[in-house]
Amino acid sequence: MDTLQERIGELKKRRKAVILAHNYQPDTIQAIADFTGDSLELARRCTQLDADVVVFCGVWFMAETAAILNPGKTVLIPDPAAGCPMADMITAAQLRAFKAEHPGAKVVCYVNSTAEVKAESDICCTSANALAVVRAQGDADVIFVPDRHLGSYTAEKLGRPLILWPGFCPTHQRLTVAEIAALRAAHPGAPVLVHPECPQPVRDAADWVLSTGQMCRHVAQAPERTFIVGTEMGILYRLRTENSDKAFYPVNDRLLCPNMKKTSLEKVLWSLEDLESRVTVEAGIAGRARRAIEAMLEVG
């Protein structure tokens, strides 16, 4: 009997499909993906796809972005219930009201948001390019939604105020300074890498604040052999696969996003068999959201 991986491979060829996976996906999903990356890497890859079907292994807002950038393709998400609490912390109506309170301000929208919120924004950003995107707005006032931590990190690095929405990532809220200190004591000399979605005290306690893609590139070039990692534990699969001679320790074992872990091999197989669940975005919203995403991609 064929394994699940073999059946997925056969169906992928038959459907002319490509499988994309975020760095936080389960190990088994990353192992079968055609491309694994962070939000920026996946957004860029979505503009270069030569496939009829895109199976997006991530959470809903990511699959929406793939659908927006690939209007002629069938975009599937293996589990349509894989949402994002941060993305749900702001609605399009709330953003419109917030903009009315700050007339003339540019809206920089973290990609961890719904298509409707992206459509109300001037430009999107990811954790990898937030500094470049905000810098590109010149001297204009900037509203940054929805993550207050990435927003405060960006403001701190650029030395300028931003108007922040009070959203956050529940997973990154689980890191503590005390846990970092304990791991430093257990692994002397190991640098601490954390994600910019972490609260400021955690960022201040780290050696490096990096997106997941930046973490992968940094580790590959770093001379150290041991690292302490402060982000969702799915990244450990890629770090260990690409750096088999190095050791990685998560800040704690609670760094698990339940939505990212909803994808399974069975669900990927079923999505290819039934071409479900399809991700679609209303044309008007998709058009405006696409402009914000493409503006981000032009910044780089």
Image (spheres, grey):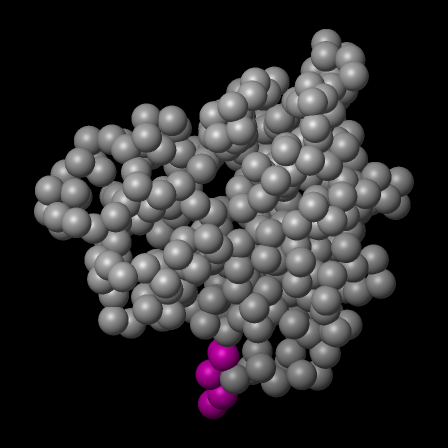
Left-right relation of 46 to 269: right
* Magenta span: 1-5
Eyeballing the image, is 13 above or below 204?
below
Is most of the magenta stretch helix, strand or loop? Answer: loop
Answer with the quarter of the image where residue 21 lies. bottom right
Question: Is residue 2 shown in magenta?
Answer: yes
**What is the x, y in percent for residue 102?**
72, 12
Which one is nearer the viewer's eye here, 135 or 199? 135
Q: Which residue: 52% across, 84% down?
A: 6
Answer with the quarter of the image where residue 230 lies. top left
Q: Which residue: 66% across, 22% down?
A: 143
Eyeballing the image, is 218 above or below 137?
below
Eyeballing the image, is 167 above or below 189?
above
Most distant residue in the bottom direction? 1
Answer with the quarter of the image where residue 181 lies. top left
Question: Does residue 40 show up?
Answer: yes
Question: Is residue 238 shown in magenta?
Answer: no
**What is the x, y in percent for residue 204?**
32, 30
